[in-house]
Amino acid sequence: MFEQLEMAPPDPILGLTEAFKNDPRPHKINLGVGVYKDAAGRTPVLESVKAAEKRLLQEESTKSYLPISGAPEFGAKVRELLFGADHEIVKNNRAATAHTPGGTGALRVAGDFIKRMFPAKALWMSTPTWENHANVFRAAGVETKACPYYDAQRKCLDFDAMLNGLESAPEGDAVLLHACCHNPSGVDPNPAQWEAIAALVQRRALMPVVDFAYQGFGDGLEEDARGLRTLCATGAEMLICSSFSKNFGLYNERCGALTVVGATRDAADRAFSHIKACIRANYSNPPSHGGAIVSTVLGDPDLRAQWEGEVAAMRDRINGMRRLFVATLQARGVRTDFSFITRQKGMFSFSGLNRDQVAALRDEYAIYIVGSGRINVAGMTEENMDTLCAAIAAVLGKTA
Ligand code: LMR
């Protein structure tokens, strides 16, 4: 049976990591998958995480199952991070949280929930969006539709086109919004634009599905939640998919969360009962370790302060690399203006390099970036910068 099957194509992001590992060239550089590297090119375990793990190892007394939605204290800490401890949503219990295997797990459960309870709803996604979004929602059986977002000419948000696109969504449809650090473009709405998006969502009764994978990597933990909180201020019902892969460095622990916000506590409880039913039919209940780390760090003032410092250090290093990247390209004689890269937020830079240039970087220089031209800035170091920029300069020189 299986010999007749065609091979599935490699994943556009994780498939690159496999190809990179198999590449024998010693000078190879992987700027594909969104994984943070420090100045020495390592992906370290955060100190705050290590300290929490030590504590957990000593105190853990059982490996019994967690509830379907994970540990209640984890959910409470996630909501504090999303909304702020004193937020009306928290006080009125209008939100409930499930601990999921990674942010991708949260997106998939959101997709299952939409398909099961609102089968007529389509999901509107920005163009471009994370390579895996359409894949996840289509696998859940949710129809996806494209909405303009990025102006590739001017390297900025095409806000009017975005609003017009959303305006054409039938009332009640779902809309996928990146809370901050838009993946892959690095271009986010400003506060006034978030107000306009929130007003449109309210007027057209759209259901936001907010992907929040980079809290703390844009301007700060609180600052990055402003767009989400603007949406919340309208009283909108929504689904929020958090990831702790990046801001806690918990990539392989697969730790994320799905939070549902209801118009009332009763509405949230009803929606959450179906979310739990979706989870039970999928992975049953979540793996404990990552969630226990997050709750331990966020629940201890010293560890939390240490973690906030570590998130700030990652953010600062990435921003430093953005500036050095632009300066090094200039120093290498590249005439194209890449200064827009210093205005992009988060881990990624949408470089504007085309598919042929991306292929040339891989084939001729062993530099791996995503086919869309997305570069993981968090993978740049002072050491690999010159090799990288020399290769880009050569490729641009050839194809310009
Ligand atoms: C990325 O966009 O590179 C990350 O979110 C990792 C992934 O799973 O694709």
Image (cartoon, grey):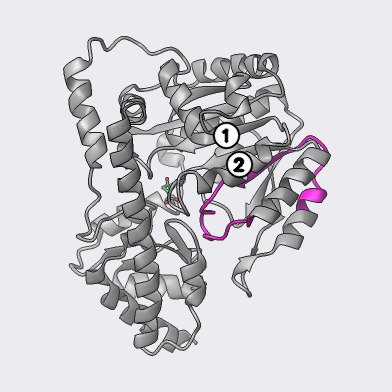
> Which residue position holds label 2?
228
Give the vertical position of 359 relative to 188 (above or below): below
Which of the marked residues, 1 or 2, is nearer the chain's N terminus?
2
Asked whether the beta carbons under mark 1 and mark 2 sit within 8 Å of each other, the answer is: yes
Residue at 42 percent of width and 56 percent of height:
347
Stretch in magenta: 165-190
Residue 152 lies in quadrant = bottom right
Which numbered circle lies on residue 158?
A: none
Front position in the image: 163 or 2: 163
Residue at 40 percent of width and 68 percent of height:
322
Nearer to us: label 1 or label 2: 2
Secondary structure under the numbered disc 2 in the rendered image: helix
Secondary structure under the numbered disc 1 in the rendered image: strand
Residue 356 % position (x, y):
47, 74
Q: Is residue 26 visible?
A: yes
Residue 216 among those drawn in magenta: no
Residue at 56 percent of width and 60 percent of height:
187
